[in-house]
Amino acid sequence: MAEAMQTIQEEVQKELESFKALKTSLETKKQDYSSQKEELESLQGDLSDKKTIVGTEKASKTAILNVTKGQEKKFQDLLKQTQAQQEQIQKDIEAIESKKRALIDTAKIPGSQKGLFSWPTEGVITQKYGSTSTTGFTNPVYSFHNGIDIAASTGTPIKAPMEGKVIASGTNGNYAYGNWIAIDHQNGLVTLYGHLSSKKVKVGDTVKKGQLIAYMGSTGFSTGPHLHFTVYASNTFSTAQKWYGLLPSGGSLNPMNYL
């Protein structure tokens, strides 16, 4: 009788262990399924955003073609006028920021610290920070480049390089930074993201490091899709309403000191 009971207990124990193993396996599969579901939803959201971007660009090009069809001279005159306005705005920005750089309080900003920010996007640096005689891109319109340009294709994701709060956002049309966002990282630094094709955050939003905030584009004063990334001392940053939209400005710092 005792042997029979021992045998039954051993079989029950084996069944219990088998059940525990099955439960663990099911929980692991559930977690894997949940992770795959989140990844799929993220990819679907990304695809939807990019479809919207492509549709917007296509509609814009179609509108331009319809307006300019048979009006080549009028279009060329308008283009020259727009270019002249773009150039004047860039000169105005440079003059404003030249004065603001002198207002930077070094006691209120982090010292040079590589890796403080993660890279906001993937791509190739096509223009560095500083005097245009050394940035790799000579431009007769302005002599100082207040950020770095990272070029890739339209729709390339742009992510927050550090946690912070969106404190400003604007649309400058064909001028200045085009669609842009500014984030205050509450450590003495504000970052600016320009020439965006689409924005995923709004003023007042709190963002986490690595969070998707926008997609790369070529809006504003731009010759091709890229991200214009500027780092400002927060004590100098401000915005001003202009005829072409809200314009950000400040005392800029070399982004490479923090990337």
Image (cartoon, rainbow, N blue to C red):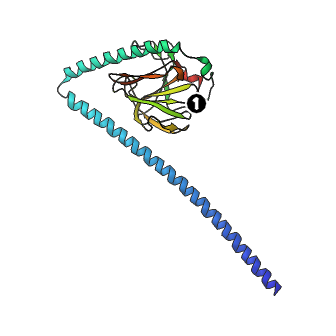
Query: What is the x, y in percent for residue 37?
Result: 50, 54
Q: Position of residue 66 (x, y in %)?
A: 21, 32
Q: Position of residue 147 (x, y in %)?
A: 49, 21
Question: Element under label 1?
Answer: loop
The residue that mark 1 highlights is 117
The answer to whether 186 appears left or right of 249 in the picture is right
* Residue 65 visible in rendering: yes
Q: Is residue 87 above or below residue 183?
A: above
- Front-lying residue, 5 or 54: 5
Q: Nearer the viewer, residue 74 or 240?
A: 240
Q: Label 1 sits on what residue type? A: Phe
Q: Is residue 33 left or right of residue 224?
A: right
Q: Which residue is pictured at 39% across the width and 45% down the height?
A: 48
Q: In the rendered view of the protein, which quadrant contains the N terminus?
A: bottom right
Q: Quadrant of residue 68?
A: top left
Q: In the rendered image, which quarter is residue 226 located in?
A: top left
